Image: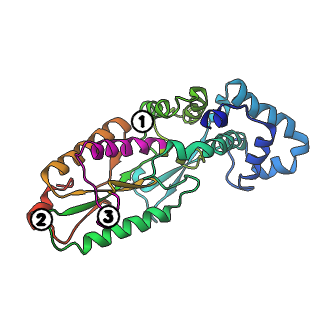
C-alpha cells in the first residue's frame, strides 16, 4: 500500500488540487504573488506552473530558487526586548507552497502507517481530542488513587523553540528509518527543509514556521521520543499508567510540540525517564522548557518520593 502511494508519479490534477487548498490572500513570498493570482490567471500560467512542479517532483529538477524565504519576526508580547520574545514566520512563495502541498497530500495517505498511535495531531483519522480525553481519564484516576504502595506520575513536557532547534541529521535518520519503502520520496521531503534566507544568512538546522510541510516533518522528529518510550516500556523499564485496572498501559501521549509521559514514582523509572529525555535532546536538538513543564503525582505518592521526578 505504502509503495503504491508514494512511488507513483505526480499528476497534473494534484497540482490544481494543491493550489485550491492554499489560502487565496495569505502572505506571499519574495515574488509578491498570492495564490489568488495563480487561480485567476490559471488559463495563462497554468501549463508552465504544472510543468515546473512536475519536473521538480518527478524528474528531480533543482528547486533552490524556490527555497529562498523571507523571514518575518512576529512579537509574542506587547514590548519585546530580545529575540526570545519574537516568533519567526517564513513567507514562502506560492510555487514552493504548491510543491509542499503536493507532498503533504501524498504523505497524508501513508502517515498513519508511519506515526505511532500516541501521536494524534495532523494524522488523518485521529483527533487531538482522543488524546485529550485519554489524558483526562488517566489524570482523573491518579487524582483518586489514594491506596497502594506505588505512586504514579504524569510529566507534561513543553519543548522550547521546538521547530527552531530540530537537527537535520537526526530528522534525516528518522526519515530513512521510516522511508525504507521509497527513499527518493522522503529525500524530496528532506530537501525542502534546507532553506536559505537570501544573502543574509544560511541556517544549518530548524524547520520553517509558516511552512505547511513543517508540522509533518516535526511528527517524524517526535517519533524519536515515542520510539524511546516504547522501547523502555517493552523492556520493562517504564510501566506507564492505566485509566482502569483492565485498561492498557499508557506510557506517553503526544500533542504536536507538547507531550505527557507516564510512569511509576520510583528511583529506577525516574532515572530512565531522565536518560530518555537527555538522549532525545542530544540527538534531536530539542530542549525541554522546564518553566512551562509540570508534574502531577497520584494522591498516594509519599512526599519524599516527589524528589525522584526529572525536574529535580
Instruction: Locate residue 52, reporting x and y percent.
Output: 77, 31
Q: Is residue 7 visible?
A: yes
Q: Is residue 91 something one can see in this rendering?
A: no
Provide the residue span drawn in magenta. 220-248
Residue 46 occupies quadrant = top right
- Answer few, some or many: residues within 10 Å of disc 1's Cα (few below 14, many 20 plus, some between 14 and 19): many
**Residue in the picture at 31% in, 37% down:** 282
In the displayed structure image, the side of residue 214 where residue 297 appears, left or right: left
Q: Residue at x 66, y 31 (%)?
A: 7
Q: Secondary structure at mark 1?
A: loop
Of the numbered discs 2 and 1, the one sitting upstream in the chain is 2
Tag 1 residue: 167
Indicate the quadrant containing the N terminus: top left, top right, bottom left or bottom right. Answer: top right
> In front of the other: label 1 or label 3?
3
Q: Which one is in front, 146 or 290?
A: 146
Mark 2 and mark 1: span between their CA atoms?
Answer: 41 Å
Q: Is residue 134 above or below residue 121?
A: below
The answer to if 243 sits in the magenta stretch is: yes
Location of residue 244 by image quarter? bottom left
Percent coordinates x, y for residue 259 in the rendering? 38, 55
Among numbered discs 2 and 3, the one appearing first in the sequence: 2
Amino acid at each position: 500500500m505504502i509503495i503504491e502511494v508514494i512511488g507513483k508519479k505526480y499528476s497534473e490534477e494534484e497540482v490544481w488540487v494543491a493550489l485550491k487548498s492554499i489560502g487565496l490572500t495569505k502572505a506571499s513570498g519574495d515574488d509578491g504573488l498570492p495564490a489568488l493570482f495563480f487561480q485567476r490567471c490559471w488559463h495563462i500560467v497554468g501549463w508552465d506552473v504544472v510543468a515546473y512542479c512536475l519536473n521538480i517532483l518527478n524528474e528531480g529538477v533543482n528547486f533552490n530558487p524556490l527555497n529562498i524565504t523571507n523571514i518575518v519576526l512576529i512579537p509574542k508580547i506587547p514590548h519585546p526586548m530580545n529575540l526570545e520574545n519574537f516568533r519567526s514566520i517564513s513567507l514562502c512563495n506560492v510555487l514552493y507552497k504548491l510543491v509542499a502541498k503536493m507532498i503533504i497530500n501524498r504523505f497524508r495517505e501513508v502517515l498513519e502507517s508511519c506515526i505511532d498511535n500516541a501521536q494524534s495531531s495532523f494524522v488523518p483519522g485521529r483527533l487531538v481530542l482522543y488524546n485529550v480525553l485519554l489524558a483526562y481519564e488517566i489524570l482523573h484516576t491518579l487524582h483518586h488513587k489514594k491506596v497502594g504502595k506505588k505512586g504514579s506520575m504524569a510529566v507534561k513536557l513543553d519543548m522550547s523553540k521546538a521547530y527552531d532547534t530540530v537537527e537535520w541529521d537526526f530528522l534525516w535518520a528518522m526519515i530513512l528509518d521510516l522511508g525504507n519503502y521509497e527513499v527518493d520520496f522522503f529525500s524530496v521531503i528532506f530537501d525542502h527543509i534546507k532553506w536559505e534566507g537570501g544573502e543574509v544568512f544560511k541556517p544549518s538546522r530548524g524547520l520553517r514556521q509558516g511552512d505547511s510541510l513543517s508540522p509533518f516533518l516535526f511528527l517524524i522528529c517526535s517519533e524519536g521520543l515515542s520510539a524511546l518510550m516504547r522501547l523502555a516500556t517493552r523492556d520493562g523499564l517504564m510501566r506507564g499508567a492505566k485509566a482502569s485496572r483492565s485498561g492498557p498501559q499508557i506510557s506517553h501521549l503526544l500533542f504536536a510540540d507538547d507531550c505527557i509521559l507516564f510512569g511509576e514514582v520510583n528511583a529506577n523509572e525516574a532515572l530512565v525517564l531522565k536518560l530518555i529525555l537527555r538522549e532525545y535532546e542530544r540527538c534531536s536538538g530539542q530542549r525541554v522548557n522546564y518553566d512551562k513543564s509540570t508534574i502531577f503525582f497520584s494522591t498516594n505518592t509519599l512526599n519524599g518520593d516527589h524528589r525522584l521526578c526529572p525536574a529535580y
